[in-house]
């Protein structure tokens, strides 16, 4: 069943939370511009088609077709995704992850917290973004630079253990 209004509402709620968190982190312009590519036909139409409400439509598209066309488009245009940050190593001539700049790492953190909040709804806890991250860690499928991974893990653990106020106070002390 196609759910265009529900999908648009989910995108807008997610962007609202990312903007809120980016403002708390001191990067409001990034929050304002966050995920605008989701309104492009390449991402919007599959998002509507595979919408379920409790997880990313990209997961459903990937399960049914073997890949997500929307995700392929999205990750190449949004610097807050670690998948964007890979390049050919001149020595090995293989694609490898490179370290993310701090401001995009912070936006990625805000994005993950917002996504957990939107998809978990009233069941959301500050531990949810960390648990989602650790689930991916156990599967050893994440092509992320080790330093970026450690920094993100630190922020997510800080959120789970100390809460939003302490985490965003710490984030505001970081150089961007």
Image (tube, grey):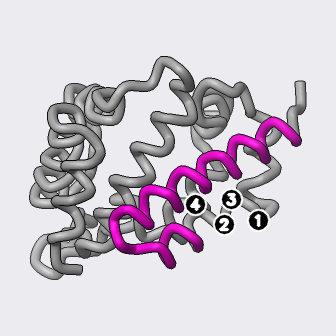
Q: Is residue 64 above or below residue 26?
A: above
The residue singled out by tag 2 in the image is 37
Q: Residue at x 33, y 65 (%)?
A: 25
The residue singled out by tag 3 in the image is 38
Q: Position of residue 133 (x, y in %)?
A: 28, 36
First of labels 4, 3 by sequence position: 3
Quadrant (top left/top right/bottom left/bottom right) for the C terminus: bottom left
First of labels 4, 1 by sequence position: 1
Instruction: Say which quarter of the image contains residue 170.
Output: bottom left
Q: Is residue 42 visible?
A: yes
User: Do tag 2 and tag 1 residues touch (Cβ < 8 Å)?
Assistant: yes
Residue projecting furthest to the top: 123
Task: Label 1: state its secondary structure.
Answer: loop
Q: Residue at x 44, y 52 (%)?
A: 111
Give the Cα distance between marks 4 and 2.
Answer: 7 Å
Is residue 40 left or right of 104 when viewed as pictured?
Answer: right
- Which class describes the residues within 10 Å of circle 1: few (<14), some (14-19), or many (20+)? few
Is residue 172 left or right of 80 when viewed as pictured?
Answer: left
Is residue 96 left or right of 68 when viewed as pictured?
Answer: left
User: Do tag 4 and tag 2 residues touch (Cβ < 8 Å)?
Assistant: yes
User: Do tag 3 and tag 2 residues touch (Cβ < 8 Å)?
Assistant: yes
């Amino acid at each position: 069943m196609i759910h265009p209004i529900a999908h648009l509402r989910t995108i807008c709620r997610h962007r609202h939370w990312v903007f809120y968190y980016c403002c708390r982190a001191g990067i409001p312009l990034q929050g304002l511009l966050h995920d605008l590519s989701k309104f492009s036909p390449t991402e919007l139409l599959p998002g509507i088609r595979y919408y379920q409400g409790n997880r990313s439509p990209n997961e459903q598209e990937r399960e049914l077709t073997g890949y997500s066309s929307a995700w392929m488009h999205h990750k190449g245009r949004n610097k807050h995704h670690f998948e964007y940050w890979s390049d050919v190593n001149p020595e090995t001539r293989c694609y490898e992850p490179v370290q993310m700049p701090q401001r995009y790492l912070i936006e990625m953190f805000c994005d993950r917290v917002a996504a957990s909040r939107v998809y978990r709804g009233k069941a959301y806890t500050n531990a949810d973004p960390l648990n989602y991250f650790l689930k991916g860690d156990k599967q050893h499928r994440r092509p992320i630079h080790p330093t970026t991974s450690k920094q993100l893990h630190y922020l997510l653990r800080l959120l789970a253990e100390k809460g939003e106020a302490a985490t965003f106070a710490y984030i505001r002390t970081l150089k961007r």
